[in-house]
Amino acid sequence: MTNMVKRMIVFLGLIALVTFSTMAVSEDRGSEVVAELSKELDLTDSQIESVIEIMDNNFSEMEVIMSSEDSRFKKIRSLRSQKNNKNEAMEEVLNDEQYEKYIALMKEKREEFKASRKKQK
C-alpha cells in the first residue's frame, strides 16, 4: 500500500473511533475530554466554558458528517476541515504555551490510537 492509502486508513480509523465514542456517550466523552484538557493545560474557568462549547460543536459536527450520505472521500475532507476549524477555535481560546501543549497532546493521542490499531491487526 502506498503511504497515502495508509494515512487515509489511519485517518478513517481515528474518525470512526471518535465518532462511535461520541455517538455512544457524547456528553460523557465531552466531559472526559474537557476534564483532561483542563488538567493538562491548566485552564481557567472562562477557558473551560469556551472549550466545552468548542468540543460540543465538534462532536455534533462529527456526528452530522459521519451520518451523511456523502462519499468516504468527501467525509474525510469535511472532517479535516472541521478539525482545522476546531483547532483554530482552540488557538483563539488558549495562550501560546497552552496551544502548543494541546497540539502535542492531540499528536500523542493519535499515536496511541495508531499503536492500538496495529496491535489489533
Image (spheres, grey):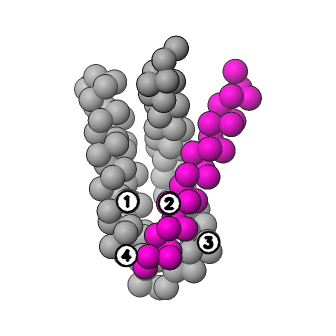
Query: Please, which residue is most extreme toward the right here?
Result: 119
**Label drawn at residue 64:** none
Q: Are marks 2 and 1 in contact (CB under 8 Å)?
A: yes
Of labels 2 and 3, earlier in sequence is 3
- What amino acid type should be assigned to the residue bearing mark 1? Asn
Of badges 2 and 3, the one in the foreground is 2
Of badges 4 and 2, the one in the foreground is 2
Q: Check disc 1: other Cα within 10 Å, few if <14, some if 14-19, many if 20+.
A: some
Q: Secondary structure at mark 1?
A: helix
**Label drawn at residue 40:** 3
Tell me how far mark 3 sits from mark 1, CA to CA: 16 Å
Is residue 16 visible in the rendered image? The answer is no
- What amino acid type should be assigned to the residue bearing mark 3? Glu
The region drawn magenta spans 95-121
Q: Quadrant of the C terminus?
A: top right
Q: Which residue carries the number 4 mark? A: 93
Q: Which residue carries the number 2 mark? A: 103
Q: Check disc 4: other Cα within 10 Å, few if <14, some if 14-19, many if 20+.
A: some
Q: Residue 54 appears at what percent x and percent y?
A: 37, 64
Residue 6 on the magenta segment:
no
Q: Which residue carries the number 1 mark? A: 87
| Front one among 17 and 116 | 116
Q: Residue at position x 58%, y 59% from top?
A: 105
Of labels 4 and 1, earlier in sequence is 1
Residue 40 quadrant: bottom right
| Front one among 18 and 25 | 18
**Image: 42 above or below 88:** below
- What amino acid type should be assigned to the residue bearing mark 4? Val
| Front one among 25 and 18 | 18
Of labels 2 and 1, earlier in sequence is 1
Q: Residue at position x 60%, y 50% from top?
A: 109
